[in-house]
Amino acid sequence: MTNKKAKVLLNWSGGKDSALTLYKLQQSEEYEVKCLLTSISQRYQRISMHGVRTELLDRQVESIGKPLVKMEIPDMPSMEIYEETMRNTLSSLKKEGITASVFGDIFLEDLRTYRQNKLAELDLVGVFPLWKQSTDLLIREFLDLGFKTITTCVNEKYLDKSFVGREIDEDFIKDLPSGVDPCGENGEFHTFVYDGPIFSKPVDFEKGEVVLRKYEAPKSKDESDQCFSKEKEDPSTYGFWYCDLIPV
């Protein structure tokens, strides 16, 4: 008798952690990935936090060969708006047979607890294939598998302008300052994956403008606030360097 795979959605940022997570799910006998779910800036039509154009996201997902659900959210949404949007989206997907939501989180305990509690309200479960694994080993596994990725956003609190728009390779890892996680798990940097074993063909782009954007710190932490480390006090403003990627 063949065990039936659980139907799951993967929270897809377009970056390296979600790409490695999808690879591991595809090797699994437990899960069937029915769709990818991506948060999109309603105003700018870019992947939340990563700043990648939705046209590149579409090309990326087309190469992967999975259905994509875009969840549009306003800029700097309140907790109430964010949670209502997520709840409505997940409720709709649950009707299609989804039983679990998969994340590429590695070691942020409070974020994992938040996700699990919100999913439980909808009678869904959270799955975390990368949980508690060494980020040093994960980034090297990612590279050894043949994935190709570029940084699209770096937090100026941790990294300077020179780190944005760079390919992640051994030199990038060696150049990271002490205390910066090699997977950017504290929100130090975000990426766009354009080639690797989950793709039927590479996603073509060219690098565009590099800009610094400043934001007011949120009054409370929510699950989209991954730009800070676990310090007791956050600055009143924070900035990110973005490298625009242009479809070709």
Image (spheres, rainbow, N blue to C red):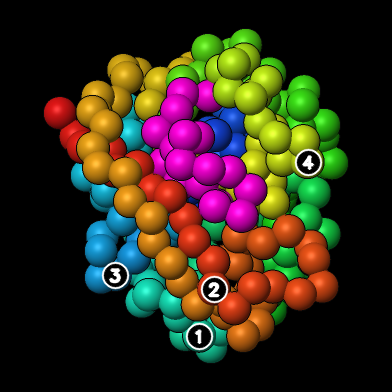
Instruction: Count how many numbered circles sit on residues in the image.
Output: 4
Q: Does label 2 or label 4 sit earlier along the sequence?
A: 4
Measure the C-alpha gap from mark 2 to mark 3. Answer: 22 Å
Residue bearing the label numbered 2: 237
**Badge 3 amino acid:** Gln
Residue for point 27% across, 50% down: 54
**Badge 4 amino acid:** Gly
Q: Does label 1 or label 4 sit earlier along the sequence?
A: 1
In the picture, the disc for residue 42 is 3
> Is any atom of residue 120 visible in this view?
no
Instruction: Write down the region rendered in magenta.
Output: 151-168
**Is 107 within the magenta?**
no
Measure the C-alpha gap from mark 4 to mark 3. Answer: 34 Å
Q: Secondary structure at mark 2?
A: strand
Residue bearing the label numbered 1: 78
Quadrant where the C terminus is found in the figure: top left
Q: Position of residue 39 (x, y in %)?
A: 42, 61
Q: Does label 1 or label 2 sit earlier along the sequence?
A: 1
Residue for point 19% across, 34% down: 247
Measure the C-alpha gap from mark 2 to mark 4. Answer: 21 Å
Does 177 sit left or right of 40 as displayed?
right
The image quarter in which residue 183 lies: top right
Q: Residues within 10 Å of mark 3 (few under 14, many from 20)?
A: some
Q: Name above or below for residue 185 compared with residue 66.
A: below
Q: Name above or below for residue 130 compared with residue 23.
A: below
Q: Position of residue 130 (x, y in %)?
A: 74, 38
In the picture, the disc for residue 179 is 4
Q: Position of residue 10 (x, y in %)?
A: 54, 48
Quadrant where the N terminus is found in the figure: top right
- 112 or 158: which is nearer to us? 158
